Amino acid sequence: MRKIKRVLCTRRTALLGIAGAIAEITGCGGGGTDGVVIKQAAVQSINTTAKSVALSDGSTLAYDRLIVAPGVDFMDAYGLTQSDYENKTPHAWRAGPQTELLRTQLANMSNNGTFVMTIPKAPYRCPPGPYERACLVADFLKNYKGSASKVIILDENASIQAEVDNFTYAFNSIHRGVIDYRPGVTNIQINPDTKVVTYTDQLLVSQSINAQVVNPIPPHRAAGSAPGSWLANAGLNNSSSNGVPDGRWCVVDVLSYESTAVAGVHVIGDASSCGLPKAGHVANQEAKICADAIIRIAGGQAPDSGPVANSACYSPITASTASWLTAVYQYDASTRRMAIASNGGVTSGARATEAASITNGNFRQMNTWFNTLMGDTFS
């Protein structure tokens, strides 16, 4: 048993040094009690017939029921490769070296330069995250690199995906003149060397931008779901897009998070497709619903027929202010997915609740929320 290192970047202000270097939010955990054994190794394959898992350390684990939380991989996109992400145009959507690289690139920008961010079509990890990052970059640039600096957001979605009211206000008022939000774009192409970005706008006109720093957030897929990888070989990646199989996600029964393709295997977190957003707080909720269901099944009972989950997230807008978003999700029997619910559990017409305003108080409460969530998740 070895200690497992966790690199956390939920407090995304760390990107700009507002909350300290990334090393300061690197924690170590591990150990086990009550018969729990922690092994640090990667999954190589799952034999769903023999009910066994082969690990990268050469060992094999037998299971009665298996829970996997593989997270996401980032796809090659916009003419970029994994090497480009690591060395030239970091997405920094997984905390670590790319986060430091993006931070360095921002620090080295000349005055009144142009920063370009791309946002993939949903679903992607942390729906408000790209808009939040754009706000923080804008706050940094206008305070340290000149008020004529530009943050151009190329969003493949038709509109802002979370906290619409507060991010619209942030773009049009707080960061007015710095943030330039361009939704509904297509055909994005990025030259990792020259930092020239081309795309097609909503009017189907080709456009080109000369950027100093490019931060492409590429499309995601469940880790291991690429053809020939362990998740795909186990048959767990059974999602479709517009009725066409795409193999990017794992469709689950949200009463238990058991795969709808492979019995006895449960998938939680960002890799699952269930109606919930891909976010840390949500993964915490999914794990609890899954564990409860397995305990009930082991006792000869059916899973809870009406699970409820909560999602909450704080979004820093400047170095000292933040917004927040919260939503309650209820099981919708008609779709067999989770859906946002209003008071009384009604899902029709329900929407998430945003903070009434962007405040310093929200920024202070953000740290309390973060520490509470991390304590509950990793205790």
Image: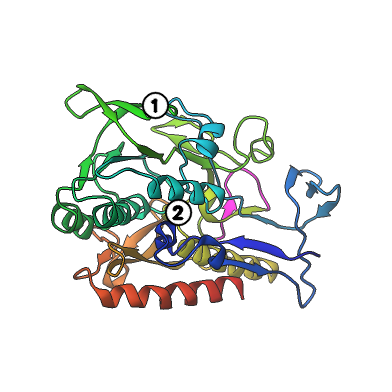
Q: Nearer the viewer, residue 120 or 328?
A: 120
Local packing at callout 1 (Cα closer than 10 Å; few below 14, some 14-19, many 20+) is few
The answer to whether residue 36 shows anywhere in this view is yes
Q: Which residues are magenta?
A: 256-264
Q: Position of residue 168 (x, y in %)?
A: 18, 54
Main SS, magenta residues: loop
| Mark 1, residue position | 194
| Mark 2, residue position | 278
SS state under label 1: loop
The kind of residue on which mark 2 rests is Lys
Q: Position of residue 242 (x, y in %)?
A: 38, 32
Whether the magenta-drawn stretch holds residue 258 is answered as yes
The kind of residue on which mark 1 rests is Thr
Local packing at callout 2 (Cα closer than 10 Å; few below 14, some 14-19, many 20+) is many
Q: Nearer the viewer, residue 305 or 206?
A: 206
Whether the magenta-drawn stretch holds residue 92 is answered as no
**Residue visible at 80% across and 73% down in the picture:** 35
Total numbered circles: 2
Q: Position of residue 194 (x, y in %)?
A: 39, 26
Q: Position of residue 334 (x, y in %)?
A: 38, 53
SS state under label 2: loop
